[in-house]
Image (tube, rainbow, N blue to C red):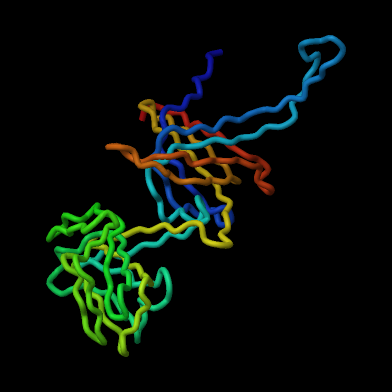
Amino acid sequence: MAKDAKQLMFGIHGVTIIDYWTGKPVAELDVIGDLSLPVSAEVESLFGGSHVWPVAGEPKTLSCDGQVTLKEYPEDLAEYLVAGVGAKVAAESTGSVVALTNDFGTSVMSATTGIASVGLKSGKTADLKAGMYLVVATAAGAVDVYAYSSVDAKKGTDLTIQDDEMKITATPLTITMGAATEIPNLGVELTGGSGTIGMTIGDTAVFEIYPPHAGVETMTMGQANAEFKRVRLFLAAQKRTTGEIGYIYCPNALALGLPGAMAEKGWSDGSLSLSIFTHETLGFSMKFTNIKGIGV
């Protein structure tokens, strides 16, 4: 009788995250690195008298906790991986601005006595520079603007960083009732409220700029009362030249974490933690499948 062909797995193709309750695939992660999913056993050993080595032992439990190196940021998996919220912004050829929001105090963003809105400046699309910006009241009717980063400062007309505090306005901008005031070289303008402007000195508000883009994806995490979600996992090895395909199905699991590194002149990656449990109705934790090729 001939020996059976060895069951082998080579490489890794992808990890599919599946909704635990519906069984519907949420997304496949395929920009990944090594996958580790060891099944560990705990043994209860018997010692007695002067014996240095255990004289007996019996298996107690099996468990499986592993990880996969993740090299992408899947916003559609935010609620599963980090108890977060993912969102997408549709492509916009002229760019867009995320609305002004009060950050410290409440007087800067005000439809009547502060800045009613921030919007695109007509004809200045080329000057839109990606990032977050802080508006600081310097007087009842004046503000300075600060950048949170210089990463896009060379877009269009260069943005001049005035000091170490990242101020981008050489002099304060005057905000007047119902009028638009351009932020120099940034491609946006601030529109004053409908009443007498009366901001409190030191109050602040923030906004974001998205230059012309093919879409924006965001992932927000750390909200109060966030809830983690159980998942199923389908782990596929690389298809071999023999035609063999191997995969692992885990019907009850947790997949938690995201890449958190920014490497110097390198790609970001990080570990996604995997924990495997027994499914209460299916009655198993993991199923290995190896489909042997026939040379087709």
Image quadrant containing the N terminus? top right
Q: Where is residue 75 in the image (x, y as percent from the top left)?
A: 41, 55
Residue 162 or 82: which is nearer the viewer? 162
Location of residue 276 (image quadrant) = top right
Residue at 37% x, 77% y is: 200
Q: Where is residue 191 in the image (x, y as percent from the top left)?
A: 26, 80
Residue 191 is left or right of residue 234, and the answer is left
Task: Residue 239: tell me if it is visible.
Answer: yes
Residue 161 is left or right of residue 18, and the answer is left
Task: Residue 31: tell me if it is visible.
Answer: no
Location of residue 100 (image quadrant) = bottom left
Residue 150 is left or right of residue 80, and the answer is left
Asked if 260 appears above or below 214 in the picture, the reply is above
Image quadrant containing the C terminus? top left
Residue at 52% x, 44% y is: 233
Residue 109 or 22: which is nearer the viewer? 109
Residue at 49% x, 48% y is: 17
Residue 69 or 246: which is nearer the viewer? 69
Residue 35 or 267: which is nearer the viewer? 267
Q: Where is residue 230 in the image (x, y as percent from the top left)?
A: 58, 51
